[in-house]
Amino acid sequence: MVRVRCKPDIALQSNIPQLLDEVRWRLPRPVECDAATSLLWIEPLAGSWPTELQRLTQALPVGGLLAVVASQPLARLLPERQRWDGRGLGLRPGGLGKLRQSLVRNGFRLEPTCHFHSFASIAVQALGQLAARSGKAALADRLHFAARLRYSGSSVLHRPATVALLVGHKEHKP
């Protein structure tokens, strides 16, 4: 677990050691933070998320913001993700639904979940790569931009994706 402070009021908790270099690259001087008004929680683990959520909920003041980044089952297709631990809550069926319900019970008002690297964008990008290999550069270009338009969103069409972002505003104590 990595918990660092990037601004006076923003803390980060990550359960993925492989992301340490990413964190250090973006946060060159991370320090511990016990009193944050905003928290970014990366990859809650299936076995420990209720305990972690309880601790984070107690630490976050009313009015605080909690952003959760979680891999989803489609992430298993990504080569870099295959080296990660497979215990992420979002990789389990219904895992993110349980987290959303628990966040509401713990006093959070949730924004619509945003999904990134959607299946639609992956499929259109693959078609674009096929077009490029077939010598159809103009079609490949159009498909590349079409894939970018489908990369993220919060609609039902974006749900099959590699990553989900849940954002909750703490409105009251549980």
Image (cartoon, rainbow, N blue to C red):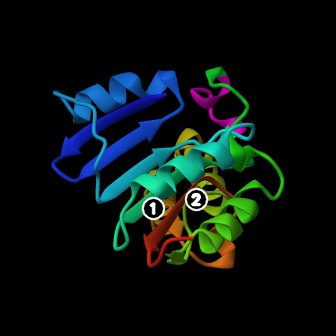
* Horizontal side of residue 27 vs 173, given as left or right: left
* Horizontal side of residue 6 vs 113, given as left or right: left
- Residue 13 figure quarter: top left
For image coordinates 22% across by 34% down, the residue present is 27
Q: Which residue is mark 2?
A: 121
Does 35 appear above or below 19? below
Measured in 3D between alpha carbons, the distance from the residue under mark 1 to the one under mark 2, in whole angstroms, is 7 Å
Work out which residue is located at the far right of the displayed protein and give it. Answer: 93
Tell me which segment is drawn in magenta: 76-82
Q: Quadrant of the C terminus?
A: bottom right
- Nearest the viewer among 165 and 134 is 165
Tell me which amino acid carries mark 1. Answer: Arg
Element marked by disc 2? helix
- Residue 24 figure quarter: top left
Report x, y in % for residue 97. 74, 65
* Horizontal side of residue 5 vs 157, given as left or right: left
* Number of numbered discs: 2
Q: Which residue is mark 1?
A: 148
In this orientation, does residue 140 appear? no
- Nearest the viewer among 131 and 82 is 82
In this orientation, does residue 29 appear? yes
For image coordinates 44% across by 79% down, the residue present is 171
* Horizontal side of residue 15 vs 74, given as left or right: left
Q: Along the polypeptide, which appears first: circle 1 or circle 2?
A: 2
- Nearest the viewer among 65 and 142 is 65
